[in-house]
Image: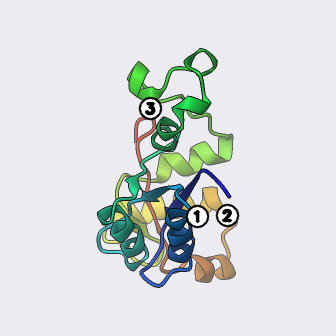
Amino acid sequence: MTLGTVVVEANLTSGALITAGMAIDNGRQLFAVPGRIDSPRSKGCHDLIKKGAKLCEGAEDILSEFEYLFPSSNRPPSPSETGTLPALSLSGSEQKVYEVLSHEEITMDRSHSEERNARLRRFRGAAQPRNEAADQATAGKAFSCEPVAGSSG
């Protein structure tokens, strides 16, 4: 069994909660990634955090629990030590998608302004070939973009 278990996007009846219980029963570390407060898929993780699972916002949260396995001489400085996140390298098509996303959610089947409609058209063009089947496959899905160090959104 692993030293720790990370639970991501678990509703209250998720099988991941059974695995989380097994980890606790076996004395293992339990981490939970929080999600949107209005999403049913986040309720299980939020419940685990309330019950004592370590809140996990990134790999550093996990690694910090197991520092004894990683002597500092073998470890690069963490973002909390340097104050900066590592640079993200995007491919050409990934950069096109990133440039048309905003920092707010945009649904593929509903938008409220001409600007969003234009961004959606650019996104569809960058993300996939334009066709009827692709429009049906993306209907109702939401996309958002978080700022990346060194990028402007």
Residue 54 on image: x %, y %: 39, 53
Q: Is residue 85 above or below residue 130?
A: above
52 lies left or right of 148: left
- Give the residue pinned by disc 1: 124
Q: Residues within 10 Å of mark 1 (few under 14, many from 20)?
A: some
What residue do we see at 50% from left, 74% from top? Answer: 17
Mark 3 or 2, which is nearer the eye? Answer: 3
Q: Are marks 2 and 1 in contact (CB under 8 Å)?
A: yes
First in sequence: mark 3 vs mark 2: 2
First in sequence: mark 1 vs mark 3: 1
Given the image, on which type of amino acid does mark 1 rest? Arg
20 lies left or right of 44: right
Residue 32 on image: x %, y %: 44, 59
Q: Which mark is residue 6?
A: none
Q: Residues within 10 Å of mark 2 (few under 14, many from 20)?
A: few
SS assignment at label 1:
helix
Q: Are marks 1 and 3 in contact (CB under 8 Å)?
A: no
- Give the residue pinned by disc 3: 149
Q: Quadrant of residue 130?
A: bottom right
- Give the residue pinned by disc 2: 128
Q: Is residue 38 above or below residue 88?
A: below
Placement of the C terminus among the 4 image quadrants: top left
Is 83 in front, or is 87?
83
Q: Gap between marks 1 and 3, in whole Å?
A: 25 Å
